[in-house]
Image: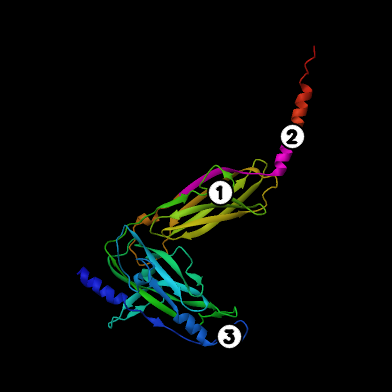
Amino acid sequence: MYKKVLGMGMIFALCMTVALSVYAQTGNTGKKVEPTIQVQAFSNLRVRHCDDGLESEKLTIQNFLTLDGDENKTLCNVFINDSDFDITVKYAYVEASIWNSWKPNCSINGGKFASLISTPEPTSFTIPAKSNIVRKDKMFLPPGMSEGIIRGCLWYGVESIKWVEDKRVQMFKIENRKVVLYEVLIWWVANIQNAVSLEAQKSNVFITNKNIKVTVNTGWWLVVSATVKNSGNVDQIVNLTGEVRNFLGFEKIFSIKDKKIGPFQTVELPIDISNIPSYKWIFDVKMAISYAPSLSFEGFNLSEDVLKWGSFYETGKFFLFSRYAVAALAVVLLILWSIIKSIIPRKKQA
């Protein structure tokens, strides 16, 4: 039975659908753009699976996978631009079905197949002329999805072109896209995995808590951040509140609300802290971070375990060096020493 399914998957994966609309439109200068620019860019853009390596003989247009409830896999895709122009590419994962003729039908919407994929990097990026860029996305099994075969497409297309006269040629007024296909055999249902943690970070100033990152940029611009890692298989909605203060009355309250972090993603949450006192010195920082699973997807049989939530509470002290404060302290110490010296009686000489 498995061999039969595998054979069907190989036939399915070897298919590739190309939809191309060529048109002329107005650029930024108001002149007509020749359609050959779009044709060259689109015709010379391709995606290949690179799960076995980047050597040309190892690149494929087929991908048949099995997925268990307790594992995740990395999808390697190389985007190749053989045209003479820098092009901005956009891609997405969507659900697919097979017609009676075994031709694939890729949906416009993501559907359940898109719920299998976590894309840690932006899905729109620029590829220089005659070069390629590798993207690696995570595939995992969301909780509640039933066993069986799920088919999907990675569709990709040209969003814009930067051509020889440095003008942008927009492409998505009429959508152009190509697709490569996936077929995934799911062995068993995944359990809910809530696994959220804070990652230790390196600051460029001294701080007592490594889970809080403090950086000072040029011009004494202060940034405080926390890095949240979602190792589970459901989206997490993260909220962060905190404050920076010192013993002289300075106080700065900050917050980040409803930040979504996808499965198997690590995200840094930075906060800009302005108007730090010029005397700097020692500051206290506090952070309260809460997280809860997101229930935005539909069509799954979810248990009450998905409602679990958690929180972190972090405190620390950091030190900012100020020459003015050091000079003022030196003056104060010098005055104190002068006072003490005048009070202490001198020994009489024999």
Question: For this rendering, which residue is in front, 118 or 130?
Answer: 130
Question: For this rendering, which residue is in front, 235 or 208?
Answer: 208
Q: Position of residue 283 (x, y in %)?
A: 62, 43
Q: Position of residue 350 (x, y in %)?
A: 80, 11
Q: Amino acid at mark 3?
A: Thr
Q: For the magenta stretch, what is the residue range?
A: 311-333
Tell me how many marks there are: 3
- Let me know if residue 174 appears in the view: no
**How much space separates mark 2 and mark 3, taking CA atoms?**
70 Å
- Let me know if residue 126 appears in the view: yes
Q: Which residue is mark 2?
A: 332
Position of 203 compared to 101: left or right?
right
Mark number, residue 26: 3
Q: Mark 2 or mark 1, which has the lower sequence index? A: 1
- The answer to whether residue 269 is magenta is no
Q: Mark 3 or mark 1, which has the lower sequence index? A: 3
Mark number, residue 112: none
Q: Amino acid at mark 2?
A: Val
Q: Are marks 2 and 1 in contact (CB under 8 Å)?
A: no
Q: Which residue is mark 1?
A: 203
Position of 211 compared to 137: left or right?
right
